[in-house]
Image: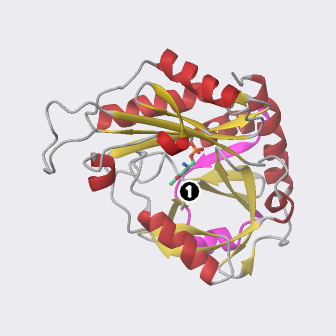
Amino acid sequence: RTVYVNGEYLPETEAKVSIFDRGFLMADGVYEVTTVLDGKLIDFDGHAKRLARSLNELEMKHPVTEEELLAIHRKLVEVNEVEEGLVYLQVTRGAADRDFAYPKDAEPTLVLFTQKKQAVNSPAAKTGISVISLPDIRWGRRDIKTVQLLYPSMGKMAAKAQGADDAWLVEDGFVTEGTSNNAYIVKDGVIITRNLGNEILHGITRAAVLRFAAEAQIKIEERPFTIEEAKAADEAFVTSATTFVLPVTKIDGEAVGTGQVGPIAARLREIYLEESRKTAV
Ligand code: PMP
């Protein structure tokens, strides 16, 4: 693969970042993942805007403009011949002597690479996934997309250890989100998903799916819900850039609704794939 590091396109074996990089030492970095379908970037604008917001919230320098960012994404997709897959992007505060205080003169590190991956024809989209519930003990600024991903990794491992696929995180009795996706339930034709705040990541796929649902005259309630409410729902699903809309058919071992993929989740997946392709760049 050809990857991008601080202005250079290099073979992945030659790409290097300093051991003093604050991303490595302190998880002082943010990231984005943009999906590629038919060689084009899905929801690029949303990901670029959220990156800018994450950088601003952490008082980090913007390494390149949004235009340059798009050019880098496109070039990597092209040289690596990615038809279906993703572009991963990470910005860190850069390399400096280790100190908790932010360094004054460090230049941000910008790294991008591609991964080829089948996304549309996912077996999980046909069967649905199973989730377990876990306490949400992450930090309080989950709206910033930082590279502090150890607890979500632990959650995913806990789920796998129990024969499940993923975990939904619960705080003060209410579901926040999945380890790497936003969480939804459907009851009597109404989509219920947690309202935006510092407690969850403002999913780019979430924004698009809610827009398409509203256009399809499906009712939406943005509010917290409990695991008990989710278990008693007609349907459940998750959204993320790499999985689009993915049905959830089991929560803590109990079937949701019929235990099969529900009609609203199935329809939203189709609509999302169709509509988001139209604005791909
Ligand atoms: N929440 C969390 C914690 C995530 O890691 C992700 C995926 N990065 C999402 C939600 C979904 O966000 P998006 O739709 O922008 O991929």
Q: Is residue 152 above or below residue 100?
A: below
Q: Nearer the viewer, residue 82 or 246?
A: 82
Q: Which residue is mark 1?
A: 180
Q: Residue at x 25, y 33 (%)?
A: 59
Instruction: Judge whether residue 228 is colored magenta.
Output: yes
Residue 78: image location, x then y, percent? 69, 26
Q: Residue furthest top?
A: 67
Q: Is residue 94 above or below residue 131?
A: above
Q: Residues within 10 Å of mark 1 (few under 14, many from 20)?
A: many
Q: Residue at x 69, y 81 (%)?
A: 163
Quarter occupied by residue 254: bottom right
Q: Residue at x 26, y 30 (%)?
A: 107
In the image, taking residue 160 as reference, residue 17 lies left or right, namely left
Q: Residue furthest front?
A: 14
Residue 255: image location, x then y, percent? 77, 77
Q: Nearer the viewer, residue 49 or 7?
A: 7
Q: Residue at x 76, y 42 (%)?
A: 218
In the image, taking residue 132 as reference, residue 97 lies left or right, namely left
Instruction: Judge whether residue 128 is colored magenta.
Output: no
In the image, taking residue 164 as reference, residue 257 lies left or right, namely right
Is residue 202 visible in the rendered image? The answer is: no
Q: Secondary structure at mark 1?
A: loop
Q: Nearer the viewer, residue 70 or 232?
A: 70
Residue 68: image location, x then y, percent? 49, 17
Cβ(mark 1) to ligand 1 < 8 Å? yes
Coloured how? secondary structure
Q: How many marks?
A: 1
In the image, taking residue 16 as reference, residue 59 lies left or right, namely left
Residue type at mark 1 is: Ser
Boundaries of the magenta span: 215-235
Is residue 135 visible in the rendered image? The answer is: yes
Residue 73: image location, x then y, percent? 58, 27
